[in-house]
Image (tube, grey):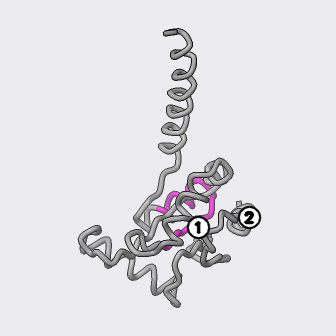
Amino acid sequence: MKSILLLLIVPFFISTQNYLEAEKDTKWLTDYEKAIKRAKKEDKNVLVYFTGSDWCPPCKMLKTDLFESAEFKALAEDYVLLYVDMPRNKDLLTHDQLKHNKELLKKYNKKGVFPLLTIVNEKGNALDEYSGYSMNGEIRYHLQLLNKYK
């Protein structure tokens, strides 16, 4: 009986461990200048993700459906990732981070669309973007954008 229980539990722990390791591998920066410096150093584009983490349902679903997917994790290696949050609860960010994010919003997200993925080259020039998410699990267009500029 114990061996049967062990056979059922071990695969669960192994899959949980693999998930946690993959989660650690996807590193999001929050500083634009650091992202651009890294992009120059590594010869990569920057993926800028504009989100409203505490109020935007499509942003929350995109986090699960896209950013936690194996396809995204593989593509993320080809980008420097920049996370730009605009929460309604201003206590979630420092004053300086909020100011920084508002500046990026003015530069790359003038319409204030959430969620928004913007591809920026190492010179800071916006190359392309994809806005919105229908929350139906369809991430094909997001992945197409990422595949186009990797």
What type is the residue that disc 1 sits on?
Glu
Kindly identify the amino acid type of the residue bearing the numbered disc 2. Answer: Arg
Q: In this rendering, would 100 be left or right of 61?
A: left
Residue 106 image point, x, y percent: 46, 87
47 in magenta: yes
Helix or strand or loop: what does disc 1 sit on?
A: loop
Q: Is residue 5 above or below residue 28?
A: above
Image mark for residue 122: 1
Residue found at x 51% / y 37%:
21
Q: Earlier in the sequence, mark 2 or mark 1?
A: 1
Count the numbered circles shown: 2
Quarter of the image containing the C terminus?
bottom right
Q: Quick one: which residue is furthest to the bottom in this view?
A: 111
Crowd band around label 2 with a 10 angstrom C-alpha radius: few (<14), some (14–19), many (20+): few
In percent of the image, x 47 and y 72: which residue is there? Answer: 51
The label on residue 132 is: none
Indicate the secondary structure of the residue bearing disc 2: helix
Relative to residue 63, is residue 113 depicted above or below? below
| Residue 6 point in image, percent of width and height | 52, 15
- On screen, 72 above or below 133? above
Q: Nearer the viewer, residue 116 or 128?
A: 116
Q: Which residues are magenta?
A: 35-50
State which mark lies toward you, 2 or 1.
2
Q: Alpha carbon of mark 2 to alpha carbon of mark 1: how far?
A: 25 Å
Q: Residue at x 33, y 78 (%)?
A: 88
Instruction: Kindly identify which residue carries mark 2.
Output: 140
